[in-house]
Amino acid sequence: MIWSYDVSTDRGKVRLLATDTDTSNQIFSDAEVDAFLNLHGADVLYAAAEALDTIATNEALVLKVLSVMDVSTSGDRLAAALMARADKLRKQSDEHPATVIDYAEVISTPSQYRERLLNQVLRTGA
């Protein structure tokens, strides 16, 4: 399994938010993190939320509710906490979308150039 962690990349940011940062206890391969990013249009917050949901589902399936001697585990509580964190990440992404839509003006004649300059002055007040 190929695993890398660099917080300057989207993959690393997903790992950071999904708590997959321990080099000795890796959760997702690079390909799996990339799949989360691809599923959500490279939205890091949504990809991390998907990763957390996947971890939560696995924990709920594996741990369930177990009690052995004085030790007990509760997979459903852990899953609920992870899913709540995933919902919070999705909400953050919805409130602050990372996608920026911009435009470009095409100028092909001298009169369009003059109009472009006039519009720029009107927009900036300069």
Image (cartoon, rainbow, N blue to C red):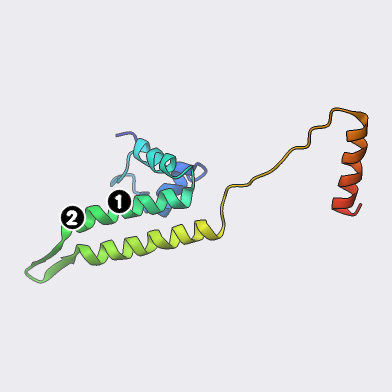
The percent coordinates of residue 56 (x first, y second) are: 28, 56
Q: Secondary structure at mark 1?
A: helix
Seen at 42% across and 48% down, the residue is: 47
Corner quadrant of residue 39: top left
- Residue type, numbered disc 2: Leu
The percent coordinates of residue 42 (x first, y second) are: 48, 42
Dot 1 surroundings within 10 Å: few (below 14), some, or many (20 or more)?
some
In this image, 126 relative to 39: left or right?
right
Q: Which mark is residue 102?
A: none
Between residue 103 and residue 85, name the one nearer to us: 103
Viewer can see residue 83: yes
Between residue 41 and residue 25, name the one nearer to us: 41
- Residue type, numbered disc 1: Thr
Q: Which residue is mark 2?
A: 61
Seen at 51% across and 58% down, the residue is: 94
Above or below, 67 relative to 41:
below
Q: Which residue is mark 1?
A: 54
Viewer can see residue 3: no
In this image, 100 relative to 117: left or right?
left
Q: Earlier in the sequence, mark 2 or mark 1?
A: 1
